Image: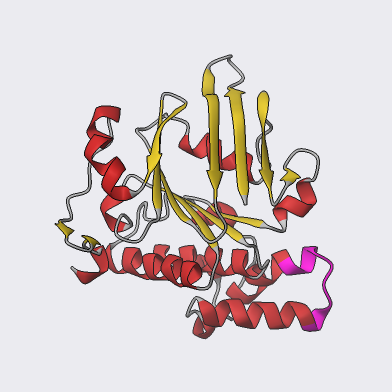
């Protein structure tokens, strides 16, 4: 589904942000990408939909190189940024969710169908005519998710989805992520709040100082997180796996 091969990237000042990162993400997988601040997590995911161009190496989605086929990749990969305000462009919720499909050149009927479906899926149909500026942080994050869903991507990437949200907002967004995964979407999440998702992910990738240091099932990776300056989750490990944060 997603292939990253020997990826390298440098910031404008010459600082190395990623060094030889290689990984494969399977279709329908839920992958958690973690690491300390400045490790290169956000830089990595911004390569997956072509927002950044590699200095060396390659990234492909469905066999399509993100540099050579940017438009095709953008239709396959949707990204929900940490700052939902930066992603909202419409005056009302409905206008914002319709923005992406409209720019795909779809018919008005197809746009309307996608918008209604995305609003229902994220549980914000009742907010359709509300001004985006009057929404709570959690509601804005769900609008951003709906806008991505209206594009019908096969991959959805979340960059720090729980940042600056209160307890109810975190639970709402986590439920939306899990619903997407249940519907077969490939999910990538970067977050410092590992305990909120560890019970639900298939694998964990650890980025440290621009390098992929470890990748595997949660039971394999969680015990070594501290060695890479990552705080391990506080939730308990049961016989069948980690306890879900939603059960708290």
Q: Is residue 66 visible?
A: yes
Q: State the residue at coordinates (22%, 42%).
A: 232
Q: How many marks?
A: 0
Q: Position of residue 71 (x, y in %)?
A: 78, 51
The colour scheme used here is secondary structure
User: Relative to 204, is 143 above or below?
Assistant: below
Q: State the residue at coordinates (64%, 60%).
A: 89
Q: State the residue at coordinates (42%, 29%).
A: 39
Magenta residues, as a range? 101-109
Does 69 sit left or right of 9 as displayed? right
Does 139 sit left or right of 50 as displayed? left
Q: Is residue 102 within the magenta segment?
A: yes
User: Relative to 189, is 52 above or below?
Assistant: above
Does 86 sit left or right of 173 as displayed? right
Closest to the observer, 112 or 53: 53
> In the figure, residue 198 lies in which quadrant?
bottom left
Q: Is residue 135 visible?
A: no
Q: Is residue 156 within the magenta segment?
A: no
Q: Position of residue 177 (x, y in %)?
A: 44, 65
Q: Position of residue 189 (x, y in %)?
A: 45, 51
* Picture quarter with the C terminus: bottom left
Closest to the observer, 222 or 82: 222
Extreme residue in the top direction: 14
Closest to the observer, 69 or 237: 237
Q: Position of residue 80 (x, y in %)?
A: 54, 55
Does 96 sit left or right of 42 as displayed? right
Q: State the residue at coordinates (53%, 18%).
A: 16
User: Relative to 134, is 214 above or below?
Assistant: above
């Amino acid at each position: 589904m997603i292939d990253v091969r020997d990826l390298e990237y440098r910031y404008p000042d010459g600082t190395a942000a990623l060094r030889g990162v290689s990984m494969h993400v399977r279709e329908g997988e839920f992958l958690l990408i973690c690491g300390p601040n400045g490790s290169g997590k956000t830089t990595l995911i911004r390569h997956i939909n072509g927002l950044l161009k590699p200095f060396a190496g390659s990234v492909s989605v469905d066999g399509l190189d993100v540099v050579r086929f940017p438009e095709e990749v953008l239709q396959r990969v949707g990204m929900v940024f940490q700052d939902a305000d930066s992603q909202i462009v419409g005056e009302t919720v409905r206008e914002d969710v319709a923005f992406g499909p409209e720019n795909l050149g779809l018919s008005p009927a197809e746009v309307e169908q996608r918008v209604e479906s995305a609003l229902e899926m994220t549980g914000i149909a009742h907010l359709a005519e509300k001004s985006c500026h009057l929404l709570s942080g959690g509601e804005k994050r769900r609008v951003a998710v709906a806008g991505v869903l209206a594009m019908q991507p096969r991959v959805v990437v979340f960059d720090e989805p729980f940042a600056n949200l209160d307890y109810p907002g975190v639970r709402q967004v986590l439920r939306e992520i899990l619903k997407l995964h249940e519907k077969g979407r490939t999910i990538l999440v970067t977050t410092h709040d590992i305990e909120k998702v560890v019970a639900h992910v298939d694998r964990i990738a650890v980025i440290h100082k621009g390098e992929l240091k470890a990748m595997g099932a949660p039971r394999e990776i969680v015990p070594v997180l501290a060695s890479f300056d990552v705080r391990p989750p506080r939730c308990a490990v049961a016989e069948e796996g980690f306890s879900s944060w939603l059960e708290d």
